[in-house]
C-alpha cells in the first residue's frame, strides 16, 4: 500500500519527480484537459504495467527495452485513435502533443522487475492518480487565470479579467515552476534533481 | 584581534551609493513624466517603487524599519524603473502586481541582488504586456498611432522634449539624456552598451530605409539603452561583451519591431540578451595582460566584430527584402467552383464593402445560401478563408484558402479538426478562443486570427445584407457626433444638406497639439470631398483621424437611424469597453445603455487596433 | 634566516658568540639564497624560532646589542676594475635581495638568462603611502646612479632608464641632474597610476612592451630593479657594505609623526613606531608594507626584515575592509584589473574552490595588486580569494606533476 | 533559399520547440548542469531530429493517411531516430537517454500535421533543432551562473529552471506579440 501512496504524494510524478512536464506545460491549459490527460496516462500506465508484467519476463533481455517502448506506443496511439473517433473536439483542445505521454510513461516505468502483480498495479495506480490530481490542479490554476473559468464555468471574469499569458507555454512554465517550488517548500526536502 | 585581509584601502563607492545615484539619475525622467501626464503618473511611479521596496523587505525578512525597508536601494531602483515603463493610464494594481512579480520572482527567486539573470523591471513589463495587454497597450498604442514610428519624417523636436503621449518615462529624451549624463559623470555606466545599442539600431534603420532618428528616439529605445540595458547585474562584465550585448539589443529591437506592429520590441530584445549574458561573458573573457600581442589582437577582434555585425545586418536585410512568399492553395476566389459549393447554378454576385458575396436567393430575394471570402491578418500576413452559410446563416463550412503561416505551426489551422468547430455557429454565437472554440496548441496566434476573422466576416455579412444603409440616404440637418480619441473625447458637428455632407467642424478635442493638427485641419475636407466617413487617414495622426471618422460616422448614424441629435458619451461605458475590444480583437457586445457610443467606439477601434496579441 | 624568496640560510653563529655589525650570521650553498648579516654588535643569546611580523615563524638569531657598533671592515672596490662576475659575487656576499617587497636575491637577477639591453629602475612607488623610494631618490641620487651603472655592467645592458611618477618633481629633478653627462642613462616620467610599480606594468609603461604571461622581464631584454636595491648594490660593490640596514616608511593616519626611517634589520616594529611618536589610539589596520598588498602585522615585536618597505598604520577613517556583500556585476574590477582578468568571476570560483575555472580564467596572471578589492562597491575580498585560488592551482599543478597526469588541461 | 531561411528563423525563434512549444522539458531540466553536458544532450537530440526528418523525406510517399496510423508512424520514426542518434554522434549519455526526448517526438509530430513534403522536412528540422540546441546551451550557461547564486532552497533544481525558461519564453514571445 505504501507504494500507492508514494506515487500519489511523496513521489508525485509531476510535482516531486518533475516528470510529465511537457503534458503539464504544453497541454494542460484547462482543468478538463488536465483531467483527460491524467486519466489517459493512468490508463496507459496501468495497461502497460500489466502487459509488461506478463510479457516482459518471457523476452530476452536485449529486446526488453524496445518491447516496452513498442507496447507503450501501441497503447498511446490506440487511445489517441479512440478519442479522435469518439470526441474529435477534444483532440483540438489537447492538441497534437497528446502522444507525448509516451516518453514520460516510459521514464516512469520501473525497469526492475516487480515482485508481485499487486504491487505493479498499485504503483501504476498511485502514479496515475498522482498525475490526475497534479494535472487537474495545474489545469484549474491555469484555466482560472487564463480563461477565468473552472471546467468551463465562468468564475472570475467579472472581477479580474483573465490573462492570456497563463494559457501560453511561458506562463505555464512559470506556474508549474512555482508549484514545484511550493511542493519543495512543503516537503522540506529540497528539490532533489536526478541529474 | 580579528584577522583582516588586504587591501586595506577601499574605494568609498558602495552599493547604496550606486543605487542612490541611479535613483537620482531617474529624477529628471520622473519629473518630465509627471509634468506631461500629471498626478496619476506620479501615483503609478510611487506605487511601483513602494511596492517593490516593501516586497523585498517582507520577503527577505528585513526589519521593517525605514532603513531595513530601503535596504541597499536596489529594490527601489527596480520599482522606479518599472513605474517609468508603464503607461500613465494604467490602473493602480498594475504597478503593484508588476513590482511584486519583479522582486519576488525575477530577483529573489534567483538569489537576490546580483544574481538575477533577467532585468526584473523589464521581465515584469514583458509579463504585464503579455498578461494584461489592454492595461498595458491602450495608450502605448495610441502613441504609435500618433507617432509615426515608421514614417519618413526627420528629427522630431516634440519627441525630443517629450511632447508625445505614452509611457511615463520614455517620452522625454532630454530628461533621459540628463539622467544618463549624471550616471556617466558618476562612472556608473560606460559608453559601450548605450552607444552600441543605439548605434546598431541607427545603422540598421538606415539599412532598412527607416528614419534613424525616429527609430532611436521613439518607443522607449532611448530609455532602455541608458537605464535598462546598462543594468549592471544583467549585462556582461567584459568590455567586448558589453559591445556585443548592446549591439544585440539594438538589432533585436528593430527585428521585433519589424515582426510585430508593437513598438516596444526593446523590452523583449533586452530580455533575450539578458539570457545570453552568461554565454557572452564566458566567450569574451578580456585580453589578459601579457598574453598575445595586444594591439594586433585588438584590431583583429574589432575587425571580427564589425565583420560579424555586417554579416548579421546583411542577412537581416536579405530576409527583410524577401518578404515571405505565400504559396496559395487557390490564389483567387474566382476560380472556386462556387456553383458546386452552393449547390445551385443560379448565383447572384453582390459586392459590398469590397467583399464579393455569392448569393443564392430564395423566393423573396433574401439570401438563402451564401458563400464569400474573407481575410484576416494572421501571424504571417493575411489568412484568407472561404465561408459557406446555410439558409439560417449559420456556418456550414470554413476552408482556409490561403495563408502564409509557419509550416508546422500556424499552418495547423487548415486542419479539419480545428475548422469543424465553426460549423453551426452564427453571428450571435460566442467566439471566445479556447472556450467556445479550442485553440490549437502550437498555433495559437493563427487560430485566434481565424476565429476573430470568421466572427468579423459574419458581422460584415450581416451588415451588408440586413444592416443599416450606407451614405447617400442621409437626412438633411445638423448633427453632433462624438468618439474617443487618445487624448479624450472628440466632438464633431456635421452638416448634411441635399443628402450630402457639406461641412464637418471639430468642436472639441483634447489631443496633443502638434501631432493631431494635421488631422484636425485635414480630415473635415477629406470627409466632405468623399461624402463619407470612411476616408484615408492623415498619416502621422492616425488615431486622431480615426476618431474624427468615427465621430462623423456616429453623427451620420444618428441621422439615418433617426435617433436624437445629441450623443452622450458615457465615460464609464467607454472605460470598460475599450480594453474589452482590444482584448477580444474584435467587436464585443455593446455595453447596455450605451449602445450607440459603443458602436462609435467599435468603428474607431476595430481597425485601428489591429494588434496581434500574444498567447 | 628567511628574508628572501628561496631556501633559508643556515646559521653560522652559535649562542654566546660575539658578533660585529656586518658579520654574516647565516650562509648557504643553495642557488636562490642570500646570506644574512648582523646589524648590531653584541652577543648571540639565542638561535630559535621567532615570529615575524606576519605571524609566521622563522629561525632567528637573537643578539643582545652591546651598543658598541663595532663594524667589520668593509672591502671597498672600484666599479671600473670589476668584472660582472666579481660584481655578482660582491652582491651575493652582501646578501642583497629585492628590497621593494619581493625579496628575490639580487645576484641572480644580475645574471639574466637572456641578453639584456635595458635596465629599468622602478622609481614609481609600489604603493600609496610608501615614500621610501622617493626620499632615497632625492637624497641618494649619486648612489642610485652608481648602482645603475653597477647593474648595467653586471648584466651587460647598454641602457638604463629610471621611471618616476610625475607627482614627484623633486625626485625627477634630482635624478635628471645626477644622470647628466651619462648618455646611457635617462629618466622616464610616468603617469601616476596604481600599480605602476609592478614589474611588468613598469616595462609596459616605459618601453610599451608586454611581458608574456609566465615569462620574465629578461624575455623582452630588461632587468627591473627597485631604487633601494640599486642603492644597496652600489653600497655593496663600491663600499663593500653588506645589507644590514634599510629605509622604512612609517606612515598612515594613526602614526603621530609619519616619516622615513633608516633602520637596522632586526629592529622590532614597535621600536620603529615608538621612534615615530607612537600611535594615536588603536589603528584600524597595522600593515607590514603598503596598504594595498601588505600583510597585516600580527606581532608588533616582530623584526624589520630586508623586504619590509614600510609600516602603514591606518586610522578608521582611511581604512576599508571586506564586507562581502553580493557582487552586483558592476564590472569595476574588470576595468580596473591591470592584468586584464575578470576578478569578479575569478574571486567567486576561487572562493568555491572551482580550480578548473580558476585556471581557465588565468589566475596565475594575477599580480595581487588589490585594485579589484579596492574598487569593489560590494567590498568583496576578491584578492584574498584569488590568492587562495592561485594556491589551489599551484597545488593542483604540483599534484599533476607528481602523478604525471593532466587533471585539467 | 529564402523559404528555407524563413522556416529556419520561424522554427528556431518564434516557434522555439522548448520555450514556445513547451517540448523537451525533460532534457532542459536534466541535462543542462554543465555546458558540455547540455551540448552533448542537445547534439543527440539534434541528430535524432535530423535523422527523423531525413527518414520522413525518404519515406514521404508511404506515410499513412489516417490520423491515428499517421501519428503511430511518426512516433515509431521518432523512436528509431532516437536510438540511431547517439550511435551517430558517438556521444552516449545514459541508457535512459537512448529512449527518446519529447522534443524529438514533438518535432516529428509537428512535421506530421503540417503536411509539407520533401526536403522541407529537413529545413524545419534544422531550424527547430538549432533553436532547441541553443536554448539548451544557454540554459546551461545560466545554470552555471546560478550555481554561484544563493537560490532559495525551495527554488533550487527544477523550479528555477522552469521559471527561467518561462521568462525566456516571455522574451521570445516579443517576436509574435
Image: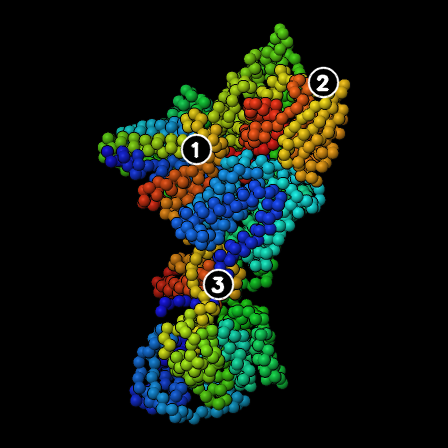
Q: Residue at x 42, y 76 (%)?
A: C279
Residue annotated with mark 1: A142
Please state which of the two labelled residues, at mark 1 or mark 3, is closer to the viewer: 1
Pointers 1 and 3 within a single chain:
no
> Quick one: label 1, few (<14), some, or many (20+) residues within 10 Å?
many
Residue named by callout 3: C372
Location of the N terminus of chain A by quadrant is top left
Determine whether label 1 and label 2 are within 8 Å by CB: no
Above or below, D30 against B530 in this view is: below
- Residue located at (57% from left, 38% from top): B89
Question: Residue placed at 56% from the left, 41% from the top?
Answer: B40
Q: Residue furthest top?
A: B363
Q: CA distance from mark 2 to mark 3?
A: 82 Å
- Residue B193 lies left or right of residue B153; in this view the side is left
Secondary structure under badge 3?
A: helix
Q: Nearer the viewer, mark 1 or mark 2?
A: 2
Image coordinates of residue C406 in percent, x first then y, are 39, 60
Q: CA distance from mark 1 to mark 2?
A: 53 Å
Q: Secondary structure at mark 1?
A: helix
Instruction: Please say which color scheme the image uses.
Output: rainbow
**Which chain does the numbered disc 2 sit on?**
B
Chain identifier of the residue bearing label 1 in the image: A
Q: Residue at x 36, y 30 (%)?
A: A38
How many labels were placed on the picture?
A: 3
Circles 2 and 3, Cβ within 8 Å, touching? The answer is no
Numbered mark located on residue B475 in the image: 2
Displayed quadrant of residue B546: top right
Q: CA distance from mark 1 to mark 3?
A: 48 Å
Q: Which of label 2 and label 3 is nearer to you?
A: 2
Amino acid at each position: 500500500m505504501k507504494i500507492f501512496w508514494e506515487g500519489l504524494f511523496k513521489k508525485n510524478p509531476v510535482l516531486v519527480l518533475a516528470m510529465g512536464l511537457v503534458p503539464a506545460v504544453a497541454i494542460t491549459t484547462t482543468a478538463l484537459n488536465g483531467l483527460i490527460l491524467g486519466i489517459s496516462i493512468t490508463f496507459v500506465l496501468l495497461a502497460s504495467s500489466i502487459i509488461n508484467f506478463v510479457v516482459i519476463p518471457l523476452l530476452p533481455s536485449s529486446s526488453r527495452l524496445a518491447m516496452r517502448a513498442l507496447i507503450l506506443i501501441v497503447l498511446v496511439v490506440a487511445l489517441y485513435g479512440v478519442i479522435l473517433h469518439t470526441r474529435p473536439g477534444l483532440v483540438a483542445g489537447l492538441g497534437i502533443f497528446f502522444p507525448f505521454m509516451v516518453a514520460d510513461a516510459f521514464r516512469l516505468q520501473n525497469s526492475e522487475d516487480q515482485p508481485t502483480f499487486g504491487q505493479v498495479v498499485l504503483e501504476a495506480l498511485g502514479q496515475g492518480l498522482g498525475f490526475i490530481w497534479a494535472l487537474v490542479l495545474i489545469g484549474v490554476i491555469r484555466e482560472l487565470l487564463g480563461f477565468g473559468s473552472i471546467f468551463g464555468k465562468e468564475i472570475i471574469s467579472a472581477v479580474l479579467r483573465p490573462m492570456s499569458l497563463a494559457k501560453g507555454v511561458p506562463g505555464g512554465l512559470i506556474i508549474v515552476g512555482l508549484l514545484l517550488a511550493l511542493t519543495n517548500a512543503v516537503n522540506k526536502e529540497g528539490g532533489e534533481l536526478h541529474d | 584581534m580579528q584577522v583582516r585581509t588586504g587591501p586595506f584601502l577601499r574605494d568609498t563607492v558602495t552599493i547604496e551609493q550606486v543605487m542612490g545615484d541611479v535613483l537620482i539619475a531617474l529624477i529628471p525622467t520622473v519629473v518630465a513624466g509627471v509634468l506631461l501626464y500629471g498626478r496619476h503618473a506620479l501615483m503609478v511611479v510611487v506605487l511601483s517603487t513602494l511596492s517593490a521596496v516593501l516586497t523585498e523587505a517582507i520577503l527577505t525578512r528585513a526589519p521593517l524599519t525605514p532603513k531595513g525597508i530601503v535596504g541597499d536601494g536596489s529594490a527601489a531602483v527596480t520599482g522606479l524603473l518599472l513605474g517609468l515603463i508603464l503607461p500613465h493610464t494604467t490602473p493602480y494594481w498594475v504597478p503593484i502586481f508588476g513590482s511584486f512579480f519583479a522582486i519576488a520572482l525575477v530577483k529573489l527567486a534567483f538569489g537576490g541582488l546580483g544574481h538575477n539573470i533577467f532585468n526584473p523591471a523589464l521581465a515584469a513589463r514583458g509579463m504585464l504586456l503579455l498578461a494584461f495587454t489592454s492595461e498595458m497597450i491602450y495608450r502605448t498604442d495610441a502613441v504609435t498611432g500618433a507617432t509615426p514610428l515608421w514614417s519618413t519624417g526627420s528629427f522630431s523636436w516634440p519627441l525630443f522634449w517629450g511632447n508625445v503621449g505614452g509611457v511615463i518615462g520614455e517620452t522625454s529624451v532630454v530628461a533621459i539624456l540628463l539622467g544618463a549624463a549624471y550616471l556617466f559623470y558618476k562612472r556608473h555606466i560606460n559608453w559601450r552598451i548605450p552607444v552600441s545599442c543605439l548605434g546598431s539600431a541607427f545603422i540598421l534603420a538606415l539599412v532598412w530605409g527607416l528614419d534613424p532618428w525616429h527609430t532611436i528616439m521613439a518607443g522607449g529605445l532611448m530609455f532602455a539603452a541608458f537605464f535598462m540595458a546598462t543594468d549592471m547585474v544583467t549585462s556582461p562584465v567584459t568590455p567586448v561583451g558589453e559591445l556585443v550585448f548592446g549591439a544585440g539589443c539594438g538589432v533585436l529591437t528593430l527585428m521585433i519591431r519589424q515582426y510585430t506592429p508593437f513598438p516596444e520590441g526593446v523590452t523583449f530584445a533586452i530580455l533575450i540578451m539578458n539570457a545570453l549574458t552568461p554565454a557572452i561573458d564566458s566567450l569574451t573573457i578580456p585580453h589578459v595582460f601579457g598574453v598575445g600581442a595586444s594591439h594586433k589582437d585588438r584590431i583583429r577582434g574589432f575587425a571580427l566584430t564589425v565583420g560579424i555585425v555586417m554579416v548579421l545586418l546583411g542577412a537581416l536585410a536579405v530576409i527583410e527584402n524577401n518578404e515571405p512568399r505565400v504559396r496559395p492553395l487557390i490564389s483567387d476566389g474566382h476560380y472556386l467552383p462556387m456553383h458546386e459549393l452552393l449547390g445551385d447554378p443560379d448565383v447572384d454576385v453582390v459586392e459590398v464593402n469590397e467583399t464579393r458575396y455569392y448569393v443564392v436567393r430564395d423566393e423573396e430575394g433574401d439570401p438563402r445560401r451564401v458563400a464569400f471570402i474573407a481575410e484576416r491578418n494572421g501571424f504571417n500576413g493575411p489568412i484568407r478563408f472561404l465561408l459557406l452559410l446555410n439558409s439560417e446563416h449559420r456556418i456550414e463550412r470554413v476552408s482556409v484558402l490561403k495563408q502564409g503561416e509557419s509550416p508546422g505551426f500556424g499552418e495547423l489551422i487548415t486542419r479539419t479538426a480545428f475548422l469543424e468547430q465553426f460549423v453551426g455557429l452564427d453571428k450571435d454565437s460566442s467566439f471566445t478562443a479556447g472556450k467556445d472554440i479550442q485553440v490549437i496548441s502550437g498555433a495559437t496566434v493563427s487560430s485566434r486570427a481565424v476565429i476573430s476573422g470568421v466572427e468579423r466576416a459574419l458581422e460584415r455579412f450581416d451588415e451588408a445584407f440586413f444592416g443599416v444603409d450606407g451614405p447617400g440616404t442621409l437626412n438633411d440637418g445638423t448633427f453632433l457626433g462624438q468618439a474617443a480619441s487618445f487624448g479624450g473625447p472628440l466632438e464633431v458637428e456635421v452638416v448634411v444638406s441635399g443628402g450630402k455632407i457639406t461641412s464637418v467642424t471639430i468642436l472639441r478635442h483634447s489631443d496633443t497639439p502638434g501631432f493631431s493638427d494635421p488631422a484636425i485641419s485635414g480630415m473635415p475636407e477629406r470627409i466632405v470631398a468623399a461624402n463619407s466617413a470612411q476616408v484615408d487617414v492623415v498619416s502621422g495622426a492616425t488615431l486622431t483621424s480615426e476618431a474624427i471618422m468615427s465621430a462623423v460616422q456616429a453623427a451620420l448614424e444618428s441621422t439615418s437611424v433617426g435617433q436624437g441629435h445629441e450623443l452622450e458619451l458615457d465615460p464609464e461605458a467607454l472605460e470598460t469597453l475599450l480594453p474589452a475590444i482590444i482584448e477580444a480583437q474584435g467587436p464585443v457586445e455593446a455595453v447596455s445603455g450605451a449602445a450607440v457610443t459603443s458602436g462609435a467606439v467599435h468603428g474607431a477601434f476595430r481597425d485601428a487596433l489591429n494588434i496581434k496579441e500574444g498567447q | 634566516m628567511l628574508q628572501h624568496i628561496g631556501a633559508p640560510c643556515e646559521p653560522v653563529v652559535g649562542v654566546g658568540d660575539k658578533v660585529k655589525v656586518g658579520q654574516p650570521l647565516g650562509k648557504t650553498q643553495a642557488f636562490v639564497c642570500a646570506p644574512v648579516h648582523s646589524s648590531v654588535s653584541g652577543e648571540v643569546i639565542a638561535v630559535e624560532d621567532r615570529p615575524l611580523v606576519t605571524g609566521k615563524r622563522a629561525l632567528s638569531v637573537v643578539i643582545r646589542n652591546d651598543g658598541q657598533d663595532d663594524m667589520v671592515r668593509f672591502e671597498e672596490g672600484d666599479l671600473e676594475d670589476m668584472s660582472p662576475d666579481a660584481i655578482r659575487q660582491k652582491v651575493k656576499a652582501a646578501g642583497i635581495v629585492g628590497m621593494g617587497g619581493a625579496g628575490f636575491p639580487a645576484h641572480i637577477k644580475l645574471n639574466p638568462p637572456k641578453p639584456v639591453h635595458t635596465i629599468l629602475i622602478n622609481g614609481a612607488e609600489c604603493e600609496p603611502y610608501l615614500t621610501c623610494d622617493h626620499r632615497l631618490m632625492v637624497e641618494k641620487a649619486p648612489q642610485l646612479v652608481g648602482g645603475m651603472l653597477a647593474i648595467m655592467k653586471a648584466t651587460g645592458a647598454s641602457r638604463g632608464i629610471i621611471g618616476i611618477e610625475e607627482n614627484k618633481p623633486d625626485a625627477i629633478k634630482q635624478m635628471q641632474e645626477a644622470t647628466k653627462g651619462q648618455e646611457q642613462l635617462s629618466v622616464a616620467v610616468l603617469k601616476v597610476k596604481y600599480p605602476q610599480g609592478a614589474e611588468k606594468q613598469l616595462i609596459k609603461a616605459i618601453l610599451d612592451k608586454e611581458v608574456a604571461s609566465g615569462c620574465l622581464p629578461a624575455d623582452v631584454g630588461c632587468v627591473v630593479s627597485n631604487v633601494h636595491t640599486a642603492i644597496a648594490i652600489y653600497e655593496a660593490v663600491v663600499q663593500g657594505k653588506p645589507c644590514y640596514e634599510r629605509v622604512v616608511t612609517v606612515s598612515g593616519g594613526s602614526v603621530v609623526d609619519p616619516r622615513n626611517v633608516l633602520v637596522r634589520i632586526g629592529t622590532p616594529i614597535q621600536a620603529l613606531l615608538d621612534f615615530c611618536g607612537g600611535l594615536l589610539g588603536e589603528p584600524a589596520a597595522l600593515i607590514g608594507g603598503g596598504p594595498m598588498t601588505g600583510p597585516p602585522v600580527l606581532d608588533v615585536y616582530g623584526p624589520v626584515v630586508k623586504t619590509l618597505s614600510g609600516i602603514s598604520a591606518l586610522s578608521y577613517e582611511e581604512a576599508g575592509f571586506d564586507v562581502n556583500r553580493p557582487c552586483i556585476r558592476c564590472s569595476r574590477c574588470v576595468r580596473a584589473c591591470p592584468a586584464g582578468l575578470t576578478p569578479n568571476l575569478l574571486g567567486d570560483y576561487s572562493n568555491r574552490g572551482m580550480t578548473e575555472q580558476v585556471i581557465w580564467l588565468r589566475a596565475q596572471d594575477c599580480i595581487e595588486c588589490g585594485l579589484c578589492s579596492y574598487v569593489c562597491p560590494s567590498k568583496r575580498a576578491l584578492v584574498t580569494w584569488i590568492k587562495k585560488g592561485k594556491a589551489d592551482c599551484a597545488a593542483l599543478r604540483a599534484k599533476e606533476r607528481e602523478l604525471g597526469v593532466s587533471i585539467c588541461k | 533559399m529564402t523559404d528555407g531561411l524563413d522556416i529556419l528563423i520561424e522554427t528556431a525563434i518564434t516557434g522555439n520547440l522548448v520555450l514556445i512549444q513547451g517540448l523537451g522539458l525533460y532534457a532542459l531540466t536534466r541535462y543542462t548542469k554543465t555546458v558540455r553536458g547540455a551540448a552533448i544532450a542537445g547534439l543527440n537530440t539534434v541528430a535524432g531530429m535530423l535523422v527523423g526528418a531525413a527518414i520522413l523525406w525518404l519515406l514521404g510517399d508511404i506515410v499513412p493517411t489516417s490520423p491515428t496510423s499517421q501519428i503511430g508512424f511518426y512516433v515509431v520514426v521518432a523512436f528509431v531516430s532516437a536510438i540511431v542518434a547517439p550511435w551517430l554522434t558517438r556521444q552516449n549519455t545514459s541508457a535512459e537517454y537512448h529512449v527518446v526526448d519529447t522534443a524529438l517526438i514533438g518535432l516529428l509530430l509537428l512535421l506530421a500535421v503540417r503536411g509539407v513534403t520533401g526536403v522541407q522536412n529537413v529545413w524545419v528540422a534544422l531550424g527547430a533543432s538549432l533553436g532547441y540546441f541553443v536554448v539548451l546551451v544557454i540554459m546551461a550557461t545560466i545554470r552555471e551562473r546560478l550555481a554561484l547564486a544563493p537560490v532559495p532552497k525551495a527554488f533550487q533544481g527544477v523550479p528555477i529552471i522552469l521559471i527561467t525558461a518561462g521568462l525566456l519564453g516571455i522574451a521570445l514571445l516579443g517576436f509574435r506579440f
